[in-house]
Image (tube, rainbow, N blue to C red):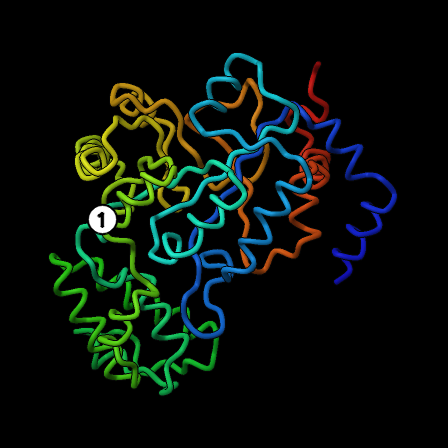
């Protein structure tokens, strides 16, 4: 509450306008994920309500921020020819809700955007295991989970799901065990058993597609409607072993390029996880840029394989969003950390 009052006062005093001018050479890259299709809301940064996203893109247009296609923005960042306050819109993962709502909202405002798509669950139309586990635990009617009955060995007894820390630990244990299983079919069976123990209908969850990705046909249609589809690894992971990482990118490309009909050379690190030692490999694979989840603006000296973004979500208030876009929050960050350019040259 106090933060929002301070931001409103800063805007009234003209500090947003001053910040916008001072940071005009910085490239703003917005990060979105999905649209929530279920009742209520779930996932403060993972999912937004459709009306929140529509309001965001409408506000970007109203405020006059020039929105560029990613490829054009990267080229102009390198050449030093970006327009003032240049902005890029990116969307991660490829959720079905993004297809249902984001594509049309962007088209209505005539704004370009990039979709970083991970492809395993696009090819295999099932609930995304990690997100589904979180959702089932968060919404379960039964508020106690017998981990020992669900996971072989000493899994930690019974978790009280009304205790947020206990619920988080239970989710972590189920996900860690599931991701250690050899086949996704086994993970889906674990998810079904989790749902049965908590009174949740995982079959209905799968049918609703609220925690599922778009299909190949839907992705192809989104690309045909102007969405720039790029790489996000095949299985949403960034292995440290070179051969495994190369496989992730090769498999991702092999799944996407036939759908969109062109080569791809931009990557989003899954969950922002990356390692600078992998950059030579990424360059050899033709990756021209890669985005992180580190907050901030991008300048001529920003490594193209470590581009910063501004992460938007349902919990971000409109005044906070405007503060980020204007550069006011960016200047505060830089003053706190005393690094990087506060005022852009030119």
Residue at 35 percent across and 29 percent down: it is 266
Up the image or down, 335 lies above or below 172; here it is: above
Image coords of residue 283 (percent x, y): 31, 20
Image coords of residue 147 (percent x, y): 27, 78
Q: Residue furthest front?
A: 108
Up the image or down, 164 lies above or below 228; here it is: below
- The foreground one among 104 and 85 is 104
Using residue 163 as the reference point, say whether residue 128 is left or right of it. Answer: left
- The foreground one among 181 and 208 is 208
Residue at 18 percent across and 39 percent down: it is 255
- The residue where tag 1 is placed is 217
Disc 1 element: helix
Residue at 31 percent across and 66 percent down: it is 132
Quadrant position of residue 131: bottom left
Image coords of residue 36 (percent x, y): 43, 63
In the rendered image, which quarter contains the C terminus? Answer: top right
Up the image or down, 145 lies above or below 251; here it is: below
Residue at 28 percent across and 63 percent down: it is 175
Image coords of residue 245 (percent x, y): 23, 35
- The foreground one among 288 and 34 is 34
- The foreground one among 107 and 149 is 107
In the rendered image, which quarter contains the N terminus? Answer: bottom right
Using residue 246 as the reference point, say whether residue 86 is left or right of it. Answer: right
Up the image or down, 238 lies above or below 342; here it is: below
Using residue 78 as the reference point, say whether residue 278 is left or right of it. Answer: left
Quadrant position of residue 160: bottom left
């Amino acid at each position: 509450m106090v933060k929002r009052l301070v931001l409103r006062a800063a805007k009234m005093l003209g500090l947003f306008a001053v910040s916008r001018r001072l940071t005009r050479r910085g490239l703003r890259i917005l990060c979105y994920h999905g649209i929530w299709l279920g009742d209520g809301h779930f996932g403060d940064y993972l999912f937004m309500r459709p009306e929140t996203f529509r309001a965001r893109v409408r506000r970007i247009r109203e405020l006059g921020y020039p929105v560029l296609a990613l490829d054009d923005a990267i080229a102009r960042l390198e050449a030093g020819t970006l327009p003032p306050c240049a902005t890029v819109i990116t969307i991660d993962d490829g959720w079905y809700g993004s297809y249902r709502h984001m594509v049309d909202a962007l088209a209505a405002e005539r704004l370009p955007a990039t979709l970083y798509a991970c492809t395993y669950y696009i090819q295999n139309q099932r609930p995304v295991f990690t997100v589904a586990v979180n959702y089932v635990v968060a919404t379960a009617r039964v508020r106690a989970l017998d981990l020992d009955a669900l996971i072989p060995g000493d899994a930690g007894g019974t978790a009280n799901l009304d205790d947020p820390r206990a619920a988080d630990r239970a989710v972590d244990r189920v996900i860690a065990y599931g991701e250690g299983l050899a086949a996704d079919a086994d993970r889906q069976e674990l998810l079904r058993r989790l749902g049965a123990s908590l009174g949740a209908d995982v079959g209905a969850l799968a049918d609703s597609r609220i925690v599922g990705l778009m299909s190949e046909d839907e992705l192809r249609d989104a690309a045909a409607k102007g969405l720039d589809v790029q790489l996000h690894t095949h299985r949403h992971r960034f292995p440290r072993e070179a051969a495994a990482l190369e496989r992730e990118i090769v498999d991702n490309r092999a799944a996407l390029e036939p759908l969109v009909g062109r080569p791809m050379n931009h990557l989003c690190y899954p969950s922002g996880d990356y390692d600078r030692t992998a950059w030579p490999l990424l360059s050899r694979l033709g990756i021209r840029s890669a985005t992180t989840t580190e907050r901030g603006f991008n300048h001529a000296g920003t490594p193209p394989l470590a581009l910063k973004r501004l992460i938007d979500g349902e919990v971000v208030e409109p005044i906070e969003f405007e503060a980020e876009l204007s550069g006011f929050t960016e200047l505060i960050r830089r003053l706190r950390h005393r690094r990087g350019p506060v005022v852009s040259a030119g």
